[in-house]
Image (cartoon, rainbow, N blue to C red):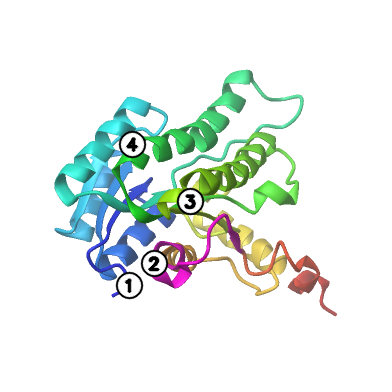
Amino acid sequence: MRLKNKTALITGGNSGIGLATAKLFVAEGAKVTITGRNKETLEAAAKELGPNALAVEADITDVAATEQAIARAVEKFGKLDIVFANAGIAGNTPVGGTALAAFEQVLRTNVTAVFFTVQAASPHLNDGASIILNGSVISVLGNPGYAAYAASKAGVRAMARVMASELSPRGIRVNVVAPGAIRTPIWKGAAPTEQAFAVLEKRIAGITPLGRIGETDHIAKTVLYFASDDSAHVTSAELFVDGGATGSPAGAPVFRG
């Protein structure tokens, strides 16, 4: 087990990528604290994860709530070895059709809250700990309508590099996992029905060199790599997990003869 006797904090751990990662971490021997805003899904996740997990209701944009959640995690399981700052939101922010509040909400959730999650955790981290931030391929793809989201995820990349420098004297590593299109609840806005999602999935598969949408386990296993000693000499890295959509888009099925 790669995380035996390790303690982890995962924000947004009650669904999607966060929950898949929490399950994998527990299976690999870690004690895991998850946070989220939805009490019902948190309770369901806690039952699924079992006795080596703690679920704490907390909105990551509330710094005091985040600090309290981390304090509870440390009280129950001890100092932290792993932080996965996973929680975030999307949000459509097209030029000419975006309110200030909508734009700022994305940045507050995806950048500011991530910084303060790491800051709140830092005094409680063991030396040699691993921090993983959740980025996105959207930071480089120029997708229309996603200015705030793209800016926030580019900000995550830049912030991770600064954090890696600041925390290196303690041997703490900071890395970014950048998912492509992954099968998670985040698509409900764009594809609210099963039929709509099937159409969306087919389109995504067509523009992805590996010919499929990603699964939450693809991301969870990448986060496990960064969290474990397998990546002991890796810091300030960003790993795109997108089936080749960013690095080799010309290899996608839609371009094949």
Q: Nearer the viewer, residue 94 or 58?
A: 58
Which of the two labelled residues, at mark 4 and mark 1, occupies the earlier sequence position? 1
Crowding around mark 1 (Cα neighbors within 10 Å: few <14, some 14 to 19, many 20+) is some
Query: What mark, if any, has residue 228 been given in the picture?
Result: 2
Residue furthest out toward the right: 257
Q: Is residue 91 above or below residue 77?
A: above
Residue at image point 32% right, 58% down = 22
Which of the two labelled residues, at mark 1 and mark 2, occupies the earlier sequence position? 1
Circle 3: element type: helix
- Picture coordinates of residue 128 (x, y %)? 38, 57
Kindly identify which residue carries mark 1.
2
Does the magenta portion include 236? yes
Quick check: 194 left or right of 26?
A: right
Circle 4: element type: loop
Circle 1: element type: loop
The residue under label 3 is which amino acid type?
A: Ser
Q: Does the CB distance between marks 1 and 2 fall below 8 Å?
A: yes
Which of the two labelled residues, at mark 3 and mark 1, occupies the earlier sequence position? 1
Q: Does the CB distance between marks 4 and 3 fall below 8 Å?
A: no
Residue at image point 63% right, 69% down = 243
Q: Which range is magenta?
A: 225-241
Q: Nearer the viewer, residue 234 or 250?
A: 234
Kindly identify which residue carries mark 3.
168
The residue under label 1 is which amino acid type?
A: Arg
- Picture coordinates of residue 15 (x, y %)? 37, 51
Distance (Cα) linking label 3 and label 1? 22 Å
**Quadrant, the N terminus:** bottom left
Which of the two labelled residues, at mark 4 and mark 2, occupies the earlier sequence position? 4
Kindly identify which residue carries mark 4.
37
Crowding around mark 2 (Cα neighbors within 10 Å: few <14, some 14 to 19, many 20+) is many
Distance (Cα) linking label 4 and label 3? 32 Å
Residue furthest out toward the bottom: 257
